[in-house]
Image (tube, grey):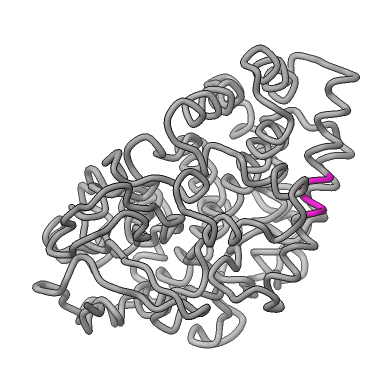
Amino acid sequence: MAAGPGTALLMDARVRHSPEAERIDTRGEPPVWRADLPDGSGAWVASGYDAARWVLTDAGFAKPAVTGGERWTRYLDFTGPQVTAGIVRSMLNADGEPHRQLREMGASALTPERVRAAVDHADDVARELLDEVAGRGRADLVREFAHPLVVRAITELLGYPPDFTRRALELRRWGPSPLFDPPGSPDRVQYAVDREAMRELMRDLVAFRRGSPGTDAVSGMIAYADAAGLDEGQLTSTLFLLLVSAYEPVADFLTSSLYALWHRPDLLAEPDAVLAGLDELLRYTSPLAATMPRFATRPAELHGVRLEPGDAVIVHIALANRDPQRFTDPNRLDLTRDTGQDLVFAHGPHFCLGSRFAVDLCRTALGAVLRHLPGLAAAQPLDTLPWQRGSTGGSITHLHVTAGLTALPVTFRAQHAVVS
């Protein structure tokens, strides 16, 4: 069973985030369908809202590291076993009691007090970064704003020493992971190199804090791991997940939101209304567009599709958040909409642990840009802006399907400094 024609069109983020989507009607199209993957294999995609919620919450679907079998375990192995074990063994790839322990360790870092302090700090960083480009009248909002803003915010929250924050800023962007590519593909080879740098940073950070513990979040996570009997790979994997899961959704939200708003200048002219409708903008952009696959652990019927044990199911969050059975006129950006129970940050036991922090950073990033860059416009035609691979073309090309731009060149009226 293939995706319906409307669903296939909405797979393309360039379409999904433009007014063109308002003419697309997916009523009557299958909520679960089969996708061909670049390596020649396939997976089921749950794009209907009810189907997506079921897969996200039902214990009959497990993470790949738990029950995906040898083939899917190999997909996680871009590098040797030591490096792999130091990156992938977080709560993202765990279920049951291991997931509970890892999630509890991560939650120990994201206390309300630390989140508030980090968001307050992010406001200052945003103004500082915009001050640096204000006189030029041009900037790349990914490289010069979103990336440094969020990396500095999350490393501030976790209590990285300055040298480790600098090293984190020097890392290449970490997603999407090319997990659907055949072994040996250029993206997989490059990601293996990147992963070694990621793991080295996390390992060095833990070693530093073991030698110089404090009241920071990393020191607290080390103490939790030791007391709970968690190993070093689980600790460094969780630290890596906290870093990347903060950056990716905020950067993708900012770029997708501006792309959508540039198509609607009436909305763009009212920054306060845009920020008041942040929940709707999050539903509309759904920066975490799809999940890692889950695997059926028993025979099941999923909205007319018969699943056998071992079958892979990807939840397409961005499409589920456009389901006409759940949302009225789902492809219309309505900043007055009461969204209610969307799937922006997933659902169930794997609901995004840092969702509150991510929402606050999304508000900070978008608000700073809209209020402090007068005359903001894309520096090239909208249809030529570069999207993440897997975001356009109507096909799934990576396990981590993102919905953001790899670069966002903009122009604005040059000024001496932003005004807070």
227 left or right, relative to 200: left
The quarter of the picture where the N terminus appears is: bottom left
Relative to residue 384, is residue 152 depicted above or below?
above
159 left or right, relative to 335: right
- Residue depicted at x 46% and y 55%: 292
- Residue depicted at x 33% and y 42%: 347
Confirm whether residue 280 shows in the render.
yes
The quarter of the picture where the C terminus appears is: top right
251 left or right, relative to 312: right
The image shows residue 75 at horizontal and vertical percentages of 59, 61
Q: Nearer the viewer, residue 342 or 45?
A: 45
Relative to residue 185, is residue 270 depicted above or below?
above
327 left or right, relative to 255: left
Q: Nearer the viewer, residue 293 or 5?
A: 293
The image shows residue 175 at horizontal and vertical percentages of 61, 61
- Residue depicted at x 53% and y 70%: 180
Boundaries of the magenta span? 196-200
Confirm whether residue 377 shows in the render.
no
The image shows residue 281 at horizontal and vertical percentages of 36, 56
- Residue depicted at x 50% and y 36%: 354
Q: What is the magenta segment's predominant secondary structure?
A: helix
